[in-house]
Each structure stands twice: as C-alpha cells, then as structure tokens.
Image: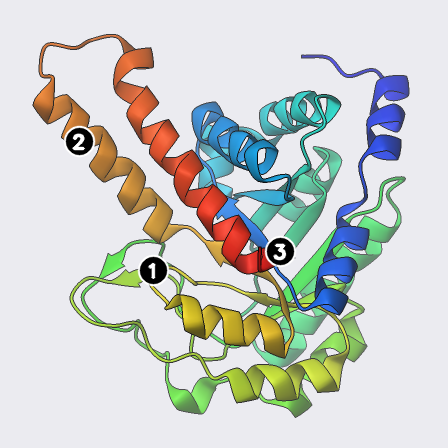
Amino acid sequence: MFISPETEISLNFLMKSLRDVVQEYKKAGKAIGHFNVSDSNQLRALADAAKETGLPVIAGLSEGEREFFPLAHARALVDLYASQGVQIYVNADHTYGLDKAKQAIDDGVNSIVIDGAKLSMEENILLVKQVVSYARSSSRDIVVEGELGYIGTSSKQLDSVPEGVTLDNLTTPEDAREFVTNTGVDCFAPAVGNIHGMLKNAAEPRLHQERVKAIADMVGVPLVLHGASGNTEADIKECIAAGVAIVHINTELRVMYRDRLYDFIRSNPGEVAPYKFLTPAVTKMKEYVAGKLRVFAGV
C-alpha cells in the first residue's frame, strides 16, 4: 500500500505521537502494551485488540522478525489501521548496531530500541548517542530507547534463568542516571529482575519494584519493562505504579499462538485452508492482547 506524503501528514496529525502517549501514560500511572509480531496476521490481531479496547498498542519487530516481515510492510499496514482510527505504533525492537538502526529509522518506525546491554557502559553510551543523533536528524518524531543491564537475549521457553543474569547485575539508579544523561534517550529499560524468555517449570524471578521506583526518580524519563512474559499481574502493576510506561511481552504470546495453532491442526488434520487454521490463533492473540492492554491501562 502506498501512502502519499500528504496522507502521512494527515495520519500523523490525526493520531497522537507515541512520545505524547507515553508521557500521558507515565503521568497517569499507566502503561502501554508492546507485543512482538512476525507477520501481518499477528499485526492485525494487535490492531483489532486496540480497536476493541480503544487503547493504544505498540507492535514490535526484532531484527529477526524484520527479516521475515519487513518494517516497510508493517509500516504500510500500521498507516492503514491508523487511517481507520486505530491507535497503533511500530517499534524496531532490540536493534544491535548503528547501520540497522539507521535502516529502521529510514523505514518509518515510531520508536526504536537500541540494545547495547552486552557492551561496556562506555560502548553502550556511544552507540546509543549515535542513534539518538540520527533519529533527531529525521523529519519525524522518533522515540529512542536505550537499555542498561543484562537480562538475556532469547524469546524462548527456558529451562533456567539465563547465564549472567543475577541480582548483582540489576541496574543501579546511579548508572541509570549516567546513561540517560549522556545518551539523551527518551525511554530507558533497566534490569530489575526481569528476564527475556519464559521459564518452563518455575515461577519467573521477582520484579524489584523498589529498584524501579528508585531508577524512575533518578532518571525522569519513562521506563520500559522488557521480558514481562510469565510475570504475575500484581508484579507488573506494581512496576507500572513505580514508573514503567511500556510493558514488553513476546515469549508468552508466541507460545500461546503456537499452541492454539497446533490444537486446531491436530483436531482438524484434513484442513488445508490457511484462513481457517490461522483464524483461531489470531483470535486468541487478539483476546490476549486486549486483556493485557486493559490490565496495563488500569481499565
């Protein structure tokens, strides 16, 4: 779908910027749901959930997901949904290098996550500063998020907590302030007990809400909670009250989508029409996302 420059300006005028929505939610003690998608069917599930609830949603695409479902395709569909009054935004999730960050910005994202969590503090700051500078040179308003503190990298079901994720590695308020001050990021994702992925046979580690509050008070920008799959609703709500304005969920959604698809195919082994065997999984995803949006927004 081609969106003319005039139409894009009109869409941007009609829909609040992601920056404004995040700030509004932060002030109100609410959070926006961020859910990763791998194709247009899952993106439609997010759009349908946002339309049903009347709440904003962020569609995230990691570097791997972007290889399968290009950002330019997602951008075109998001513009289509926006023209229908749906408040949906697209984020370049977990981007590890400057070249891919520039490409994502050029492809029209509303926001980008620069993941330098495995780098040294100095290297992380340098990378994020470069991306912030490039984003600011764009004619569009792009929210840039940086991460500090290692929480793993896999959006899979895990047998144990990722190696290197320990209480000693939680982000400190002092490091958070140094990072935010020196990079100029718009949002900040700390390590506060959260992990990427989801444990198979154990409860997720406890989220440290007191650390969230201390960091939020120190940095002043909206915080982002990554790796919220499997965490309790109560834990997530406490983090939102402490300063989290965006909550990321991926693994839990992937597992639910896959299981619903498997269930239908096992029960209907002769079905070959994709629109029939995909519909139950897409519907389940929409219902799940709608429920999470309401929880995060406190409605």
Secondary structure under tag 2 reads: helix
Which residue position holds label 1? 197
Q: Nearer the viewer, mark 1 or mark 2?
A: 2
Q: CA distance from mark 3 to mark 1?
A: 17 Å
Which residue position holds label 3? 113
Circle 1 residues within 10 Å: few <14, some 14–19, many ≥20: many
Is tag 3's residue or tag 1's residue first in the polypeptide sequence? 3
Q: Amino acid at mark 2?
A: Tyr
Residue 155 in percent (x, y) is at 36, 54
Q: Nearer the viewer, mark 3 or mark 1?
A: 1
Q: Nearer the viewer, residue 108 or 290?
A: 290
Q: Amino acid at mark 3?
A: Val
Q: CA distance from mark 1 to mark 2?
A: 20 Å
Q: Is residue 22 above or below residue 281?
A: below
Secondary structure under tag 3 reads: strand
Dots 3 and 1: beta carbons under 8 Å?
no
Q: Is residue 225 above or below residue 99?
A: below
Residue 5 in percent (x, y) is at 87, 20
Which residue position holds label 2? 262
Residue 209 in percent (x, y) is at 52, 83
Q: Is residue 219 above or below residue 117?
A: below
Q: CA distance from mark 2 to mark 3?
A: 32 Å
Secondary structure under tag 1 reads: loop
Residue 46 in percent (x, y) is at 52, 35
